[in-house]
Image (cartoon, rainbow, N blue to C red):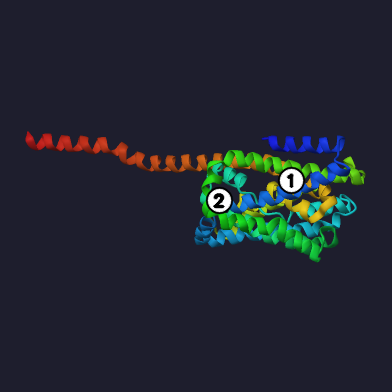
């Protein structure tokens, strides 16, 4: 079971914010840097995302509609249903974080990696992840404002301005400039990836620092964290089952079902953390905690499932090969006697 090293860095950042939270002038500087980092992140998202490749995937529209429905319809409905767990298992801040988790777009890289490992439809996974990210830039903030109400700013003019200026404008700018900077971004993918991750660490540090200063962490007890983990485990299990058996009911083939399961059951930490910082402000630390835990959980569980799917594929292939060999075996075995009788007959006529 893989432990994402980046999760360890995130946890280390949370620990640093707990020990040395930014206060006063340092807090203002960190907040300004975090705002700039978020804008830069979404600019890079726009510069990287190939609209042409995403549009080419429209040929397989049924698969993409299925993944989008799982990501932005089924997931949020399950999140709303979890409202009944307050206050038994979850308190209100953790529930809001859980609900926000269900609104976040799907991942791209891990969906592709697990689909490839399980021998599924990799091109479909690439397009599905791209579609989800593209739609999520607009849909996730709007859904969060609608279902979270005042906790995420609602539909106030201030929240709309924040979404437009910090998320949409940089993303659109990246898309418009992709023609000229796309090659540079592709050539320096590793370096810019480090910038991405460093920016997200800054966002996490700023959010958790604000939470520490305002003393909101006293709302989270070990029992509440245990309840959150249990709820997220059930949520992930339900989505994995729905995406697999639902795709089967819709008559997708095995390769497509694998892509649907891995693209439709996961949530993007990279996209969710900056969005939460914009939407929740000082309460972002509790809002992103469920997403951070779910991210690690989905990696561990999906790694096991991907290996199992690959083994099942190998078994099916071997079984098919064995069936063909068994079917050919009687013909091969019967050839020598036929040749022998021909030889005898020929010998008799010659004699």
- Between 337 and 78, the residue placed more toward the observer is 78
Distance from disc 2 to disc 1, alpha carbons, whole Å, reads: 22 Å
Number of the front mark, 2 or 1: 2
Q: Residue at the left extreme?
A: 351
Task: Specify few, some or many for label 1: CA neighbours under 10 Å numbering under 14, 14-19, or 20 or more.
Answer: many
- Between 52 and 325, the residue placed more toward the observer is 52
Helix, strand or loop at label 2? It is helix
- Between 139 and 201, the residue placed more toward the observer is 201
Residue drawn at (67%, 59%) of the image: 169
Q: Is residue 219 visible?
A: no
Is 163 above or below relative to 340? below
343 lies left or right of 288: left
Q: How many marks are shown on the rendered structure?
A: 2
Q: Which quadrant of the rendered structure holds the C terminus?
A: top left
Q: Which quadrant of the rendered structure holds the N terminus?
A: top right
Q: Position of residue 251 (x, y in %)?
A: 55, 59
Q: Which residue matches tag 1?
A: 294
Residue drawn at (70%, 40%) of the image: 198
Q: Position of residue 154 (x, y in %)?
A: 81, 63
Give the numbered dot on residue 126. 2
Upstream in the sequence, badge 2 or badge 1? 2
Q: Position of residue 96 (x, y in %)?
A: 82, 54
């Amino acid at each position: 079971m893989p432990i994402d090293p980046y999760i360890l860095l995130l946890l280390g950042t949370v620990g640093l914010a707990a020990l040395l939270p930014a206060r006063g002038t340092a807090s203002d500087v960190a907040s300004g840097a975090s705002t700039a980092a978020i804008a830069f992140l979404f600019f890079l998202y726009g510069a990287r995302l190939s609209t042409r490749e995403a549009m080419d995937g429209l040929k397989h529209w049924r698969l993409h509609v299925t993944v989008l429905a799982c990501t932005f319809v089924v997931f949020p409905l399950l999140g709303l249903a979890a409202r009944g767990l307050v206050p038994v298992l979850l308190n209100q801040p953790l529930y809001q974080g859980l609900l926000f988790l269900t609104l976040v777009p799907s991942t791209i890289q891990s969906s592709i990696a697990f689909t490839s490992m399980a021998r599924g439809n990799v091109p479909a996974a690439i397009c599905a992840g791209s579609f989800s990210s593209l739609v999520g830039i607009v849909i996730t903030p709007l859904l969060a404002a609608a279902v979270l109400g005042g906790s995420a700013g609602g539909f106030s003019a201030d929240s709309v301005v924040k979404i437009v200026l910090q998320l949409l404008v940089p993303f659109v700018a990246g898309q418009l400039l992709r023609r000229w900077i796309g090659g540079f971004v592709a050539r320096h993918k590793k370096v810019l990836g480090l910038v991405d991750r460093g920016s997200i660490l800054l966002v996490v540090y700023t959010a958790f620092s604000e939470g520490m200063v305002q003393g909101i962490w006293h709302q989270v007890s070990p029992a509440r964290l245990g309840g959150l983990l249990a709820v997220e485990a059930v949520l992930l299990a339900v989505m994995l089952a729905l995406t697999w058996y639902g795709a089967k009911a819709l008559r997708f083939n095995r390769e497509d079902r694998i892509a649907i399961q891995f693209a439709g059951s996961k949530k993007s930490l990279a996209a969710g953390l900056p969005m939460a910082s914009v939407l929740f402000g000082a309460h972002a630390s509790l809002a992103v905690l469920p997403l951070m835990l779910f991210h690690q959980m989905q990696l561990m569980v999906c790694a096991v499932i991907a290996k199992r799917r690959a083994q099942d594929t190998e078994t099916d292939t071997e079984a098919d090969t064995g069936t063909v060999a068994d079917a050919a075996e009687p013909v091969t075995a019967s050839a020598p006697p036929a040749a022998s009788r021909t030889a005898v007959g020929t010998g008799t006529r010659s004699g």
